[in-house]
Image (cartoon, grey):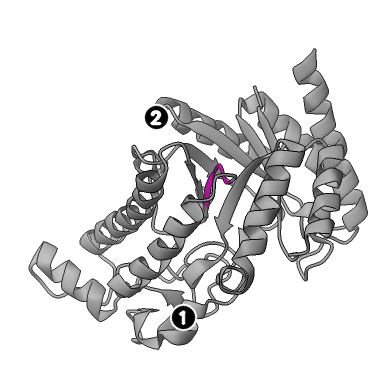
Amino acid sequence: MVKELGVAYHGNVYLDHARADFREMQEHGCNSVILAMSEYDYDQWRGQYFKMAKIAKDEFNFTVYINFWAWGRVFGGEPPSIFLNNNVAFRQIFSKTQQAFPAACFNTKAFRSYIKRAIRKVARVREIDGFFWDEPHYAYSELNLLPEDLSPYYVCNCDVCQNLFFQRYQYKMPDKENDDVFKFKEEQLLDFLQDICRTVKKIDLTKKNIICVMPSHATTGLSDWNRVCFDEMDVLATDPYWIVYQKDLHWVREEAKKLVRVARTNRKEAQLWVLAFSIPANRESEIETVVEIFDTSGADSIYAWLYRGGLQTFLKSQNPPLVWKTLGEAFQKIKKRKKN
Ligand SMILES: [Zn+2]
């Protein structure tokens, strides 16, 4: 049974506006919000984010999560990274060309200390219920926006990764990806995720860690979702954005089923994301179908990216008000069903 319905929210730090927007979310059936906080947001006005969390929690009774939105560009999203700007030396390296890609290498001590320092601060905020770790990945390409097949080459082949690889396998990390490199990369990504989730739990055991894995077809360094379900994480999520990946609703159903199955096997909660940005005109009704699919799949939480159909962003739908209305109606339907 779905307990949580919510949307991601960003682009505002004014509390009166936030209050009005949370009310609008509530009218659209939401009882939860994810505040997407980029490195710049954290740097400039994290105090406002914490106050928005308090408003969402105390005045609207929402569960509130913080998304470290595109931090180091190793999590999903478009915002630039202050860490990358200030640390050219710690970028991920493409094995074919030794070119630096725009993503921080999460095997470097510098990036780990940087993000963990911020996590400790955020984890002390009472009103925040948890952390949303979105689409953790190795750099996709020199643009690092959407998954691309780089085989037989790979990232990351930086000095830090080369040294770690050598210590483990006793030979030089090759330029082309072999089984050892594949395994090494997956283990390192899991180690990073476990490290940050543990950092959260050390501050406050009650805070949840949600990890959102990319859909199955995407090559992101995580081949087996079961392995993400370690002790320190609580909720397994995925975002089968059918229009982005040019897939159909049958595929959405299969991904949803798989997600819930893996989450249940590992005694974790299951969260599914519905696409509510970049929706072409006349395809808005698919949102309602997908929300239905998620509900029948047994998800605990259904979330949508983004508030108001992405109205304020370059990723906006063709008809954002209709996307938002359709999502609201789909959420309200679930709420009604829960009551009966
Ligand atoms: Zn590296």
Rendered location of residue 170, percent (x, y): 7, 68
User: Residue 199, percent across and down?
Assistant: 36, 52
**Residue shown at 75%/30% (left/top)?**
292
Which residue is rendered at x = 61% and y = 25% of the image? 298
The tag on residue 278 is none
- Percent position of residue 201, x then y: 38, 44
Q: Where is residue 14, by image quadrant?
A: bottom right
* Residue at figure coordinates x 53%, y 64% from the top left: 147
The residue that disc 2 covers is: 266
Residue 218 makes an appearance in the image: no
Crowding at dot 1, Cα within 10 Å, few <14 / some 14-19 / many 20+, comes out as some
Helix, strand or loop under label 2: loop
Q: Residues within 10 Å of mark 2 (few under 14, many from 20)?
A: some
- Identify the residue under disc 1: 84
Q: Is residue 98 left or right of residue 332?
A: left
Secondary structure beneath dot 1 equals helix
- Residue 288, horizontal then vertical, whole percent: 81, 37
| Residue 294 visible somewhere in the drawing | yes
Query: Residue at image x 42%, y 26%?
Result: 267
284 and 132: which is toward the camera: 132
Q: Is residue 75 magenta?
A: no
Total marks shown come to 2
Q: From the viewer's perspective, is 21 left or right of 252?
A: right
User: Would residue 76 appear left or right of 4 to someone viewing this image?
Assistant: left
Q: Three-letter amino acid code at disc 2?
A: Asn
- Quadrant the C terminus occupies: top right
Secondary structure mostly seen in the magenta stretch = strand
- Of residues 261 and 52, the one nearer the viewer is 52
Sequence-wise, the earlier of marks 1 and 2 is: 1
On screen, residue 334 above or below 30: above
Q: Which residues are magenta?
A: 128-132
Quarter holding ligand 1: bottom left
